[in-house]
Amino acid sequence: MKWNAGLYQDKHGYVAEYGKELLEYVADDKTQIILDLGCGTGELTNELAQKATVVGIDGSESMIRKAEERYPQIEFHVMDACSLKWRDYFNVIFSNAVFHWIRDQQSLLKSIYHALKTEGKLICEFGADGNISKIQKSFHDATRKYGYGFTSPFYFPTTHEYKQVLEQAGFNIELIIDYDRPTALKDGKFGLRNWLKQFFAMDLSNFTMDQQIDTFETIEGHLYSDLWDGKQWVADYRRIRVIASK
Ligand code: BEZ
């Protein structure tokens, strides 16, 4: 997926806002070295930098350039999370709202395992089973009339499934939970279509502008009774939260 770093930072700031709760699991200890995996524009990386030495990586060049511009004192790299270049190096690998973009979880967890020191911790949160299920179903239904066969690109596991994946990769699980986290989208009545423009950009690129507008209107109609709270759109997010050690 090609990220629009400007739109992301402007309209989807809540991604980092919600990630702040996850920061509470990270100890204040200046001797630690932390990797922020999938750091985006670097807001949480900067929060982590108050606690420890931190390095941020992201697969998107535009996100990393924005992060470097905002926080020039922090080390950032464009890097594939499945091919981390470090061995036995980090005390903590932290990641918020990223793992669901990565299909090959075995490679991801292998890469993280190698990059962690012994007893180092993976602290992460991402989309759980059922995450954005109403939005995805509605997108599927609204685009079918154009002959489009939408299939979800995301990985949203159950806790049961993900526990097995972590254990197979060699991790000891300290915490694994899932929970509903309804998420208010910015920009009033335009919130849902802005969210779709950001995160379903690849799928939307298959349609003309008129078809895209029709798709937004159809989805807004479908979801109005479930996801419009009278003032704003509230996306049906579900999270899985994990703490696991090497
Ligand atoms: C999420 O954070 O759950 C998410 C965001 C964009 C697309 C899919 C999921």
Image: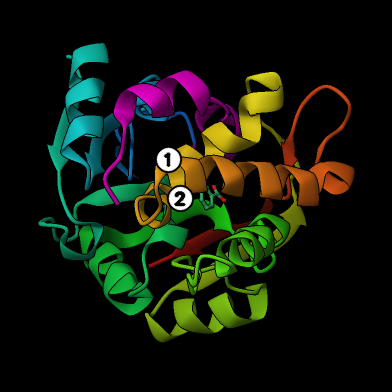
Residue under the point 13% across and 55% down: 86
Alpha carbon of mark 2 to alpha carbon of mark 1: how far? 14 Å
- Which is more N-terminal, label 1 or label 2? 2
Examine the rendered structure and indicate whether residue 107 appears above or below residue 222. below
Q: Give the residues drawn in magenta, as a range.
A: 1-26
Q: Position of residue 27 (x, y in %)?
A: 49, 36
Residue 11 lies in magenta, yes or no? yes
Q: How is the image coloured?
A: rainbow
Task: Count the numbered circles shown.
Answer: 2
Give, as a three-letter code, the residue at label 1. Met
Residue situated in front as seen by the camera: 170 or 235 = 235
Q: Nearer the viewer, mark 2 or mark 1?
A: 1
The answer to whether the residue labelled 2 contacts the one labelled 1, judged by CB atoms less than 8 Å apart, is no
Residue marked by disc 2:
200
Q: Which mark is residue 109?
A: none
Q: Nearer the viewer, residue 74 or 29?
A: 74
Cβ at disc 1 under 8 Å from ligand 1: no
Q: Does any atom of ligand 1 lie closer than 8 Å to the CB of label 2?
A: yes
Residue pointed to by mark 1? 209
